[in-house]
Image (cartoon, helix red, strand yellow):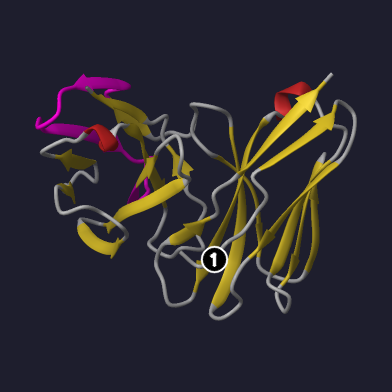
Amino acid sequence: GQNIDQPTEMTATEGAIVQINCTYQTSGFNGLFWYQQHAGEAPTFLSYNVLDGLEEKGRFSSFLSRSKGYSYLLLKELQMKDSASYLCAVSYSNDYKLSFGAGTTVTVRA
Amino acid sequence: DSGVTQTPKHLITATGQRVTLRCSPRSGDLSVYWYQQSLDQGLQFLIQYYNGEERAKGNILERFSAQQFPDLHSELNLSSLELGDSALYFCASSATFGADNEQFFGPGTRLTVL
């Protein structure tokens, strides 16, 4: 892999905000994906960042800093259905494949 | 529904056996990717095909092989199965071969080796 690091678990309360960080090696970096995966189900696409800055999509936003090798996924107004694993995945210019992080399991409590 | 189909949904077999997992990509997608996801590990990339040709290889064991057929469906063959091969196997597809393309994942095949 490409040393893609994200926290293993996070817990938050319904209605709250949670920020999931992801760090990666910057050499050859192309772009960064976030996927959501409910237990036992297929990953589904959330966002793709290529340029620095924040991209907002409803309750979910994703931020990228290319120079720092850092991204975060921000989940606002948490709902119970947001309980899932969130996967950070990076594409590099010298590689055809995506490199996935181990995923962050988010548990939303009432 | 991503448009990617995988069969079978569940597979239970014994050690030493051989199985074939099948994947049909989304209509129009030329790239197919195979991933393994075990309970204690994240999504591990196995192999990628683009328009019938192998494009990228990950940590795929020699006991495993894959191919993509002219109609673009793909099969992953797992042989001499071991207990540790028990996992969810996902297929994903994308329009082209570049890693910057969004990948659409199938529902997965859950393999249990007893």
Image-based side of A91 in relation to B78, left or right: right
Residue A106 coordinates in the image, percent (x, y) = 70, 35
Q: Is residue A12 above or below residue A28?
A: above
Say which residue label 1 marks: A3
Residue A8 forms part of the magenta stretch: no
Q: Chain of mark 1?
A: A
Say left or right for A44 vs B10: right
Which residue is painted at 55% across and 62% down in the image?
A90
Residue A44, horizontal then vertical, whole percent:
56, 39
Circle 1 — which element?
Answer: loop
Picture coordinates of residue A68, whole percent (x, y): 73, 75
Q: Quadrant of the N terminus of chain A?
A: bottom left
Disc 1 marks a residue whose amino acid type is: Asn
Specify start and end residues of the magenta stretch as a single range.
Answer: B8-34
Up-down relation of residue A105 to residue A23 (above or below): above
Neighbour tally class for label 1: few under 14, some 14-19, many 20 plus, Cα within 10 Å: few
The residue positioned 30% from the left and 32% from the top of the image is B86
Q: Is residue A72 visible?
A: yes
Dividing the picture into quadrants, the one containing residue A76 is top right
